Image (tube, rainbow, N blue to C red):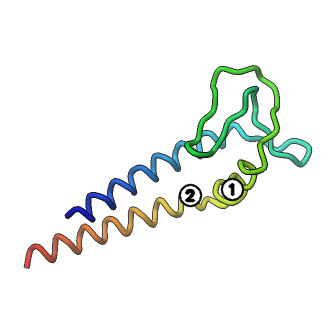
Amino acid sequence: MIILVALFSITTVFTVYAISAYSVASHVHELFGRLMWSSIPGGSFLPWPSYSEIGFPAFTPVSEIDSLYYQFFIESWMLGGIAVLLWAVSIVFCVASLLKNKE
């Protein structure tokens, strides 16, 4: 039972993280071949996605780490895929646990 609670907790936190990351990613634009934030100050994807809604409207370069993160996890939809996979594993584990307890 503890494993089931931990699995659902991790899955929920990861899903909220992914939704937050995709929300922050909506403020990233490609301009002249570079990724740019749409305001000053820019945002960040790590450790938790954040973006200041109150800022001066101007383009700010995305850092190298955030640029790699954006290209690898956001553009490829890997975060969404991992979230779906985690939910599938959680549901299968829950059903298997319920069937095992039913016997």
Looking at the image, which residue sits at the far bottom?
103
Q: Nearer the viewer, residue 28 or 52?
A: 52
Kindly indicate the quadrant of the structure image that contains residue 3: bottom left
Residue 98 horizontal/vertical position (percent)? 16, 70
Image point (56%, 57%), residue name:
79
Category of crowding for the residue at label 2, using alpha-carbon neighbours closer than 10 angstroms: few (below 14), some (14–19), many (at least 20)? many
| 18 versus 87 height, above or below | above
* 22 relative to 38 in the view: left or right: left
Q: Nearer the viewer, residue 41 or 38?
A: 41
* 9 relative to 28 in the view: left or right: left
Q: Please name the residue that numbered disc 2 is placed on.
A: 79
Kindly indicate the quadrant of the structure image that contains residue 41: top right
Image point (31%, 59%), residue name:
6
- Spatial CA distance of label 1 from label 2 is 9 Å
Image point (76%, 26%), residue name:
40
Q: Which mark is residue 14?
A: none
Q: Which amino acid does label 1 sit on?
A: Glu
Label 1 SS: loop
Residue 7 horizontal/vertical position (percent)? 33, 61
Kindly indicate the quadrant of the structure image that contains residue 4: bottom left
Category of crowding for the residue at label 1, using alpha-carbon neighbours closer than 10 angstroms: few (below 14), some (14–19), many (at least 20)? few
Residue 68 horizontal/vertical position (percent)? 74, 55
Figure disc tally: 2
Q: Please name the residue that numbered disc 1 is placed on.
A: 75
* 30 relative to 70 in the view: left or right: right
Looking at the image, which residue sits at the far right?
32
| 90 versus 13 height, above or below | below
| 71 versus 25 height, above or below | below
Q: Which amino acid does label 2 sit on?
A: Leu
Image point (78%, 49%), residue name:
64
Label 2 SS: helix
